[in-house]
Amino acid sequence: MSSEIEIRLGCFFDAFAVVAHCEILSPRRALTASKVAGWFTNLAIIALNPLSVRLMFPVLPVGMALPASERQWGVTQPRGSPTLIEVVIGVIIPDLSIYLQHVLHHAVPALWRLHMVHHADLDYDMTTGLRIHPIEIVLSMGIKLMTVAALGAPAQAVLIFEAALNATFMLNHSNIRIPESVDRVLRLFVVTPDVHRVHHSVTIRETNSNYGFNFPWWDRLLGTYKDQPDKGHEGMTIGLSQFRDHKRLSLPSLLILPFVGDPGGVPINRH
């Protein structure tokens, strides 16, 4: 697994090129600001995050899975070569942990302050999925490493999950128009852009829904699924009500937003 970084980067750039092309060919919504300006800010944040992770962690998730396997850590640690079931479990359980972590970022005030950097984007496109504060990235990586060690997931499963997550973060945040008949089938198995876009609504009740990233099942099972935004995808407003000025959402402003920005109340509630 020495090529983990190369595989992840390959998946990232391939997905980036494909999704960006589809956004240009078939956009779902008109953007409220220049695509160039939005991409500059979001991609600048992306550039900071690998550095933050590397400074804090000597290994990445696949690197954690290898010593876990050697030392027989974890509740599902395979004995010998991993079976297909063990690989599937090693993909599904980390996805559940990402869902639960996402819910916590909306429920815990300190975590919400970090996470609102992601939600403050006034447009919704593929770079929104990568617009995450460096401190949140570090915390998320720590949780991911603990999950891998506790689960004892095979390194192959962790690599599949990480590569898929790189791509799906951009896909389910993308501004791509998918035919309704196709979306209706896809959303039974994966989180489509129309599913996750609801979560980025300025309406709190909609913000408190559709937390999943790869699989939509957790939202459906745990009561946080909402099929469509009340005002429709073209009519809904993206972002947070307390941050509506593009000029106040520059890169420097976003980096200090968790410490000086108005949280607007923790948005999670039960519905």
Image (cartoon, grey):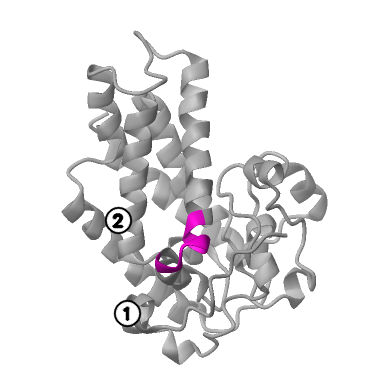
Q: Quadrant of residue 36?
A: bottom left
Alpha carbon distance from label 1 to label 2: 16 Å
The residue depicted at 51 percent of the width and 47 percent of the height is: 100
Q: Residues within 10 Å of mark 1 (few under 14, many from 20)?
A: few
Q: Position of residue 43 (x, y in %)?
A: 37, 68
161 or 145: which is nearer to us? Answer: 145
Give the residue type that dot 2 points to. Val
Q: Is residue 78 left or right of residue 84?
A: left
User: Residue 135's spot in the image, x, y percent?
Assistant: 31, 63
Q: Position of residue 209 (x, y in %)?
A: 66, 58
Taking the image as shown, residue 117 lies to the left or right of residue 64, namely: right
Which element carries disc 1, helix, strand or loop?
helix
Reading the image, the residue beneath label 1 is: 256
Quadrant occupied by the N terminus:
top left
Q: Is residue 132 above or below residue 80?
A: below
The span shown in magenta is 104-110
The amino acid marked with disc number 1 is Ile
Q: Residue at x 79, y 73 (%)?
A: 231
Pick whichever, 66 or 127, lies toward us. 66
**Among the two numbered marks 1 and 2 on one chain, the one whose residue lies closer to the N terminus:** 2
Q: Quadrant of residue 82?
A: top left
User: Which residue has dot 2 on it?
Assistant: 138
